[in-house]
Image (cartoon, grey):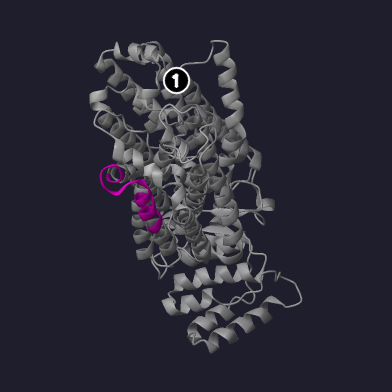
Amino acid sequence: MSNSSDPKKHPKGLYVLFATEMWERFSFYSMLALFTLYLQDPVEGFSWTPAQATSLYANYLMFVYASPLIGGFLADKILGYRKAVMIGGFFFMAGHGLLSIPAMWAVYAALTCLVIGNGFFKPNVSTMVGNLYPEGSHLKDRAYNIFYMGINIGAFLAPVVMEIVKANFGFHPAFAVAAFGMVISVGILWWFKSEVERADELAQRRTKVEEPTIQDVDDDTVSDLPPANLDEQAASLMASVPNWKRVAALIVIFAIVIVFWMVFHQNGSTLTYWANDNTGWNVSGIISNAINPFWVVTLTFPLVWLWKYLDDRGKEPSTPAKMGFGMLLVACSFFFLSYAAYVGESQQVDSSTFGSGSFRVNERVLSYLKDEGVPEDVIGKLRDAKGADKNNVVLERKFSTDGSFSSAFSSIVIDQRLEGVTDAELVKLNSLKIEKDGKFGGDDSFPAYIDKAVAELKKQGVRDEVLKRIEGYKDASFKSSDKLKAAVAKVAGPEASERYSSVILEKSYQFLVSPWWLIIGYGIVTLGELMLSPMGLSLVSKVAPINIRGLMMGGWFVATAIGNKLTMIGVYWSIWKQSNFFLVLGLCAFAMAILLAILLKPLKKAMPGV
């Protein structure tokens, strides 16, 4: 079966698939790192609220994790694996390319393409790895370890590259870079197709008696251990357990999976928001998406060594026990982040801090303002005021200090969107060449720069009324506190702004905590992930009764999709205290850990040998 002449060496096809998957994961995680922040961006994006962005993110993940059911079936029965992967790659390219178009229709078209692409690509490239090896090959597990490193190298590089590209060129060029990653992925698979073509032979040779190879549909499932690999004693033990007990045990596992993904996949939404708004570093929240794959690469081999060390002494925990420990660690990571948020929320804020940092008025802040005696009519204006572009003037806008001509002009562009510039004018404003390093108080004064900008825009045909508004910024302050006060005055009137600005600034101030809280929190949750996710599909394949194994595999996929849909709990990020939000997630994970502890003995009886 292997296309290598030496059965003791990995076939060249493994390294082809390693590179193919690495670049595909680079593209996939590039999009996830950017997506929710892009939707919220008021200049290049659509000024969505975090709740709106989180909802779409959750729906996208749900469909992404359900799509391999169809893609794997079509590859098994009709297309073959390599062809399915190629088709998926082209859909991926189209999806990432569409995201580089600044239009809402392009976003939905892109998500459709990405879901279809994932369905064809993700399960089948992983299946091809297993198909390069004969059944029972001792190299197969090691092959998946190597393959898993490709996944995580791509996942680590993606946010790092996206942070650099977005900071220097913007969101849309960053999405274009993600599309180029897929060009490399598909190009590698096509150019070296002779090294992987024989991986399709398994599909042609299967009979109804043979068991399907495990198809890895989530990025963290590294094992390909079909029932045929169980030793005879373990198989005999499993066969002695009534089917209903095995099914009941798997339903418990599915419940764990649902909660795990609901909590874990906050990384692309609320944890990104936390990194972007509340973490004291000089980068955006995009970069935070590199922390988890860094820890995966760092912790995988020490954990594998630990399991081997315990196994040699007959003390390795059972799979259900490992999953219980994993869920407990996931809970601990969010308890840790809850305390970090509590530390931030307890910081003293006064007028001396208003000149720095950033501010965001959201539903949580509005409830604080109500408690402080701010009138309902003022609160209503802060919540409901919309600009000419139908986006919020105050609510959920991030007000941060601008220190350069380019960032200040971005703030001006946001205001002009609210005032109702045409789409054509907006393109001209966004494309105006700005001195990236021009600072306030430099060789060129800000009023002089405004004059240059107005002159250039006049040449491009921007209306005089828009140019007059831009000229009005010559004496404006671009400190975050002054920008928020100006927005409040615009919607609630100068008197209300003067009277309530102090309490509004105090309650909407975005605290900052050390990046180490986030880095360590990710380290703990990653250790939990490594005890939970990798054995999932393998466990289903070993425990499910053979006559309903396909149905139970489907149950795993459905549970995964439901868990990702439930990441929508992130809509409460702007309503609850952040410490309470993390606490709720930690308690959900802790409840599952307790459930596993209570059911550990019956689960072990229902899953002998695993």
> Is most of the magenta stretch helix, strand or loop?
helix
Q: Is residue 122 visible?
A: no
Q: Nearer the viewer, residue 165 or 54?
A: 165
Query: Residue 594: x percent and y percent?
Result: 43, 19
| Image point (62%, 70%), residue name | 406
Which quarter of the figure has residue 169?
A: bottom right
Instruction: Indicate whether residue 70 is drawn in magenta.
Output: no
Left or right: 566, with 162 as reference point: left
Q: Nearer the viewer, residue 193 or 354?
A: 193
Q: Farthest residue toward the right? A: 443
Query: Residue 460: x percent and y percent?
Result: 52, 86
Q: Is residue 200 above or below residue 223?
A: below
Question: Where, quadrant-wise, is the N terminus in this rendering?
Answer: top left
| Image point (46%, 18%), residue name | 321
Q: Amino acid at mark 1?
A: Thr
Instruction: Indicate whether residue 79 is drawn in magenta.
Output: yes
Query: Residue 578: x percent and y percent?
Result: 51, 40
Q: Which residue is mark 1?
A: 319
Question: Where, quadrant-wise, is the C terminus in this rendering?
Answer: top left
Q: Is residue 586 above or below residue 22?
A: above
Q: Nearer the viewer, residue 225 or 473?
A: 225
Magenta-tinted stretch = 74-90
